[in-house]
Amino acid sequence: MKGIVTSISGATVSVDLRGLQLYDRVYVGHARLSGEVVHLEKERTTVQVFEDTHGLSIGEPAVGARAPLTAVLGPGLLGGVYDGLQRPLQGLQRHSGDFIHSAGEIQSLDLQRSWDFIPHMQAGEQVNIGDQIGLVREGHLDHPIFAAFAGEIEQIAQGQVCLAEPLARLKDGQQLFGWQNWPVRRPRSQGRKCPAEKPLITGQRCIDFLFPMVKGGVAVIPGGFGTGKTVLEQTIAKFADSDVVIYVGCGERGNEMAGLLTEFGELRDANDRPLLERTIIIANTSNMPVAARESSIFTAVTMAEYYRDMGYDVLFLADSLSRWAEALREISSALEEIPGEEGYPTYLGSRLAKFIERAGVVKLASGKTGSLSMILAISPPGADFSEPVTQACLRAAGAFYMLDTGLAQSRHFPAINWTQSYSLLGSKAADYFRQQVDKRWTDLQRCCQDIMQQEDALREVVEVVGMEGLQDRDRLLMSVADRVRRDFLCQNSFSADAFSSPQQTVQLITSILDRYDHALKRLEDGVLLSDILQGESDAAG
Amino acid sequence: MRLAEHCYRSISAIRGPLVFVERVFSARIGETVTLVAPNGQLLEGEVLKIDTEQVLIQVFGETYGLDLEKTTVTFHDSVKRAPLSRQCLGRIFNGSFKPLDDAPMYIPESWGAVSGAPINPVAREFPHEMIETGISAIDGLNSLIKGQKLPIFSCAGLPAQELVAQILSSARLPGEGDFVVVFVALGLSYHEYSFFRETLEKMPSRFVAFFNLAGEAVVERLLAPRLGLTIAEDLAFNHGMDVLAIISDMTNYCDALREISTSREELPGRRGYPGYMYSDLASLYERAGRLHGRAGSVTMLPVLTMPEDDITHPIPDLTGYVTEGQIVLSREMQQKGIFPPIDVLPCLSRLMQSGIGEGLTRADHRQVANLLYQTYAKGRELRKLEAVVGKEGLLEEDRVVLTMADEFEKRFVHQGKARRDIFQTLDLGRELLKEYKVELT
């Protein structure tokens, strides 16, 4: 299908191709810049180009690919670093050097790499769509291969194979490969969705203890600049108990991505394997093309679903969703659509909800369960949480970790505000913690929250009358709250304290609360407050 | 593919800095054009948009004197490029690369596209060495790291330009290395211009400067930073130099962007700024960085004025989301007679931790910085309390912290025109901590 370019405005290009479908891929110009169809009209088709259009001219050729933007799924994705179109960045570097120029097509998956294939079926057996025909070892994970067609197996490979070759051939001549294409904007719907129940242990006391997250849940982290969103996301990526981590740097800083790549290459997980081996990184920094930024989260979530469908716990982290929404806004305004609130298109909410719904727990045909959890950072302009992106996310997400500029400025990290954050996923997780960790979990949690709330109220009083004006009981409470804040909620992500297991968390809070009870008793017995506080600080020092 | 230049006399409309030309044969996006006005005046421009009927051109320079009938437009079939050469060192140019220093234009070794290309994230090296600005509040507490972008947020009426001039002349590497400053000034008043010319004359010729004055073309403000950064990238990555790019004032850049966007009749975003301002700012700021296996670095120090002192205004807000920290100037410090009037509390350098400490600056750097920050933050907290309950209502130990906060401002932050190297800064910090018995462990 061929035509020509008829008009160009930035990355929005009109072509005279006919018979295309919405979201079909189109290649424009002599340089074959790739793009996707965003508007269809009788006379012309509007294409959003994923690359820099400098030098493009009208009259240049346009070719329709008759297929939408797809992700290539198969063994070898783990450890990869891709851009928003799933082009491997190392490959791009080999192709065009240290700076990114429009590169055309680069294979997402190395099809020549050799894998050790262990078949689970034999020639002569009947296979159905979705049956596991065998597996390869990808790093420390078993990577099952599922059949894409049904039929009787005529021949099946064993041992060293490369992905370019078929793994099995059916009687009717169909071939089964170890990789597949999947359109990124269509959710993969293997298995049956079920409710999320197990907690996702992040190792962050403030999250695990006060506002727990569950496997298959969705949490949002809004925060103004400098509140430590990125550090928190990266810390969770390092320590959370999931099998696979997908990290999307969506319109963020290049140096941050460089830091992440170095760090993940060096750090090791609990099984003493490099973190990078269980991670896929999608890097579309703020100066890379906007349309590719918009598609990056879909490319990434498709890969996440692929691993979920093998029965793994997948954690999807995006930093930041606001940049994605801004890309959507830029595209929408280039298409001259009628804007909604703050210039964002009116479909922002529904598109976001559709994306967030791709998270969840699924029960697979094999009997296994897989989960896809999302932790999404948001950068509200001017730290104003009433803006459309934050609000749209809040409606769809189950947990809300609000990052506080004041806390961040006093160098309290993670700067999660404990009075305004919430988790709707808490009750299921609490059941688990009560049974598996400590039966007092919920009571301790309530007690801790009470102290922090009372402190909040007392602070207002102190601002008027000064510390001296408080009763002894209240001053004791203030000092305990201070300890909870400093020793419990605060957690340095660059030290050994960066990960706290639920057992350690419970131990720490129990010791703080026990000492508080003890001090209260002594106060009632008539011991002077100054002596008690002195004893406390000695014990702590 | 066209082989020759094309010349047209078919302008259909002129709207501010934008010119619409009809019936153009295969113009390219980003292609440069030359316009000749009826009086013979030459202007340059760039193709922004093409559709079947007409081509939209953005003109670098003032469009008065242009008309619809006699003006000719020539299309050059190449994108806007900057002349690259080491010869640019010590030279001063205007916003469209014409020399302002009476010397002839040099002969370029090569040409570089001004829009630049994004650095591949896997090619980036994480920044980890400090650049010494000679300012204690920056070097000591919010160190600038090679490859970082660290903006200065100022308010109208604060001496940001004086601070810039001081950094211009006193910034250097703590160790060995070829160090160069690329200075881009946007929308300057003549008064400021002559002040900077004076500063540059006293400097050795390790600089390149671009000046766009307040009375000059608005579109040049969009072009000048890109010219400067293209030069900076060339000096850094092709000649192995460490380049500090100072761009002042980004508020004028953003206002120019808004002006052009409105004349293109685009949908306005927050406060009338275009919706793509984040991406546009990122396309400048993200050009800072270092590359694996190559010497040289581009470090960026953009300066901007916060309208109405509002840090949540789109310009500082979007800048803060791209850059790695910020240096904030405050009116309160200025009123106390402190220069530079830096309020260290809202300041942050995200990359500082990777560029300081043993082997980089000094082993005690991190601890001195943390203790100074903590004590000062506590002092500032206590000042609020003091305003309510009075000095008498405070505990003795709190009164000491209060005095220390005052002394910190007067002796550490305030330094007038003096240059302090990093060791002097750290010694001064230690001295303060010692006097007020804050112990280093």
Image (cartoon, coloured by chain):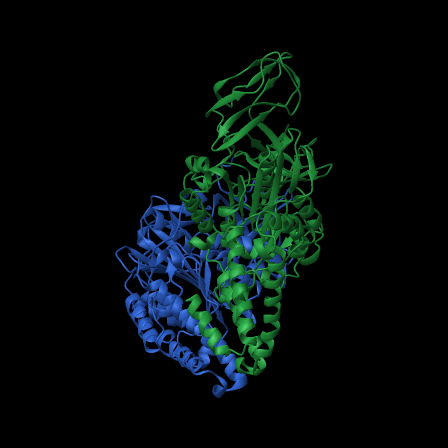
Chain colours: A green, B blue
Q: Could you tell me which residue is drawn at 60 percent across and 76 percent down?
A: A460
Picture coordinates of residue A157, whole percent (x, y): 52, 16
Give the residue at x 50% y 50%: A234
Q: Is residue B380 above or below residue A192?
A: below
Q: Is residue A44 left or right of residue A168?
A: right
Q: Is residue A376 left or right of residue B97?
A: right
Depth check: A203 or B72 in front?
A203
Q: Residue furthest right?
A: A42
Residue A456 position, x and y percent, is 60, 71
Residue B433 found in image quarter: bottom left
Question: In x, y percent, where is residue B254?
Answer: 54, 61
Left or right: B430 as drawn, with respect to A179: left
Where is residue A26 drawn, in percent x and y?
61, 34
In percent of the image, x 59 and y 67: which residue is there? A451
Dividing the picture into quadrants, the one containing residue B161 is bottom left
As displayed, is residue A155 above or below residue B56?
A: above
Instruction: Residue A400: tell me if it is visible.
Output: yes
